[in-house]
Image (spheres, helix red, strand yellow):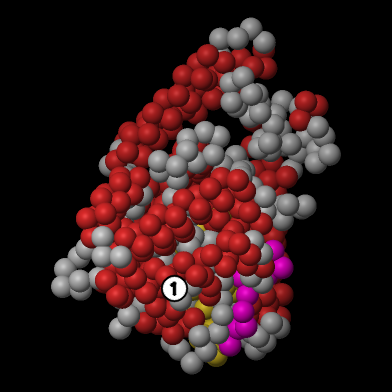
Amino acid sequence: MTRPVGRLAIVLHTHLPWVAHHGAWPVGEEWLHQAWGTSYQPLFAMLRRRAEHGERGQITLGVTPIVAAQWDAPCMVEAQHTWLGYWQTRAAGMATVREGDRRVVGQREYLAAAEALEDFEAHWSAGGSAALRPLVDSGTVDILGGPLTHTFTPLVPERLARASLVQGLDDAMRRIGRRPSGAWTPECAWEPGMETTLAHAGVEHIVLDGPSLLSAGATTSDTWLLGDSDVRVVGRDLEVTYRVWSPRRGYPGNRWYRDFHTFDHEWGFRPARVTGQQVESQDKAPYDVDAARARVEHDAHDFVDVVRRRLEHCASHEDGRRAPHVAVAFDTELFGHWWHEGPAWLDRVLDLLPEAGVQVATLTDLAADPVGRVHPGAGSWGLGKDWHVWTGPEDIADRQGSLAKEALAALDATHPRSARSRPHDQLVRELLLALSSDWAFMVSHDTAAGYARERFAGHAGATAGLVHALQEGRADDATRLAAILSARDHAFGSLDARGFLVA
């Protein structure tokens, strides 16, 4: 084994918006089905194998409560099983065509679908929490919690942010039997004073984007205390992260990997490799499994070398008393869904790191030894490292702000307080869904912007309808409306609106 040089923590952030009962194809539930079958399942299977071999502290996994709620919803578990069956059926049909390339693709997809079905029935049929809990109990996975619906924390009222985070962490406790000590701040969003919200919720550590720390005079190779609190922060190292994440030079864009954007539209499969960044879809070469596997090996070694050199560089600028660390953070859906070979690459990286003298660590491990205090300014991990992605669609941002004020005022004025109230619980549920960061993000990036605007308008309208009924004293109308809405938007049955009341 090579001389030890430091530690690496790999953080995966698992998030999709609430899509249950909000469209199926091409946008809506299809997003969850694809990510579930092609990212979550293969990643968990890889981690189970590592757990069985006694590997501990391999990954820090953030699972947003809104994803966990959909993983565990019986209707979505059943729908996912059906989706996997359709995958296998389509593949069987493609495998019978006469064209050689199509037949090969169909045969390959049939085997993949059969494996996914077997895995799902063995490990996921009782819901995602049943699949995740053994990985957490074994110590192979370190978990991060978060607010209920992935709200952009600096843009929502502080008491709403605080209650949503507390109930989000409580939700994880109910699902997997332990309350996460760390949290993922949605979009790595930060503003001074947020440490108070985190500390109140019992959060011990978070990860922020590297520039948020660097601009405050801190390093990303050390852990810091946030402001005057005891909350620890670890910085996301962009130099190493972008070796994977960068759209221009990241691994997923290599010519040998499967191309995400090229479809056989008759059967719905991806038959081509990237081939070249400027190559049109119809001119792309067929996917070559063996060549892609060889590229995975090459890129895994390259990444480990990048990590080692980064740690050596950090050590050369330190005082020598501490071994430096590196933390990288990615969307979980990159591995398998966007980058087909991602789970195999990650598995190989975890094998190679110890051989290169790099200790695989979790965020909890890194957070244990802060070196000083840092006072970051406002920032995010979004484009430009500021907030403009979420404030840019002014109509959405402005309405989110006014809607939160109206809903909280109605909650304070009308909640009976002595017991739970279904209309008020649904009011908070619809408000939090309307405040999800996803809608503004999708509009700013023009990715299914029409769907995003429709979803925001729907949840905002539902919130406003409950506000008006409650404020006008129409209790029966509010109860009937809540029943209709909760049949569609049923996330977090344990959500208690009393936790959102003014103190």
Q: Which residue is drawn at 72% across and 25% down?
A: 286
x, y (%) of residue 8? 56, 66
Residue at the right extreme, as displayed: 278
- Asked whether residue 381 is drawn in magenta, I would say yes
Q: In which image quadrant can residue 375 be found? A: bottom right
Where does the C terminus fall, quadrant-wise?
bottom left
Q: In this view, does 143 lie above or below 300?
A: below
Q: Residue at x 30, y 46 (%)?
A: 484
Residue indicated by mark 1: 405
Residue at the left extreme, as displayed: 418
Q: Can residue 142 be seen in this view?
A: no
Q: Callout 1: few (<14), some (14-19), or many (20+) C-alpha neighbours within 10 Å?
A: some
x, y (%) of residue 477? 26, 54
The residue nearer to you, when weighing 222 against 353, is: 222
x, y (%) of residue 213? 63, 80
x, y (%) of residue 207? 53, 72
Q: Which residue is drawn at 80% across and 27% down?
A: 283
The region drawn magenta spans: 375-385
How many numbered markers are drawn? 1
Look at the magenta stretch and give its main secondary structure: loop
Q: Which residue is drawn at 60% across and 83% down?
A: 376
Where does the N terminus fall, quadrant-wise?
bottom right
The residue nearer to you, when weighing 411 against 179, is: 411
Amino acid found under the numbered disc labelled 1? Lys
Left/right placement of residue 41 relative to residue 414 reads right
Q: In this view, does 48 lie above or below 78?
A: below
Q: Can residue 194 be seen in this view?
A: yes
Left/right placement of residue 255 relative to residue 348 reads right
Instruction: Give the structural element (helix, strand or loop) at label 1.
Output: helix
Q: In this view, does 166 lie above or below 459?
A: below
The residue nearer to you, when weighing 175 against 377, is: 377
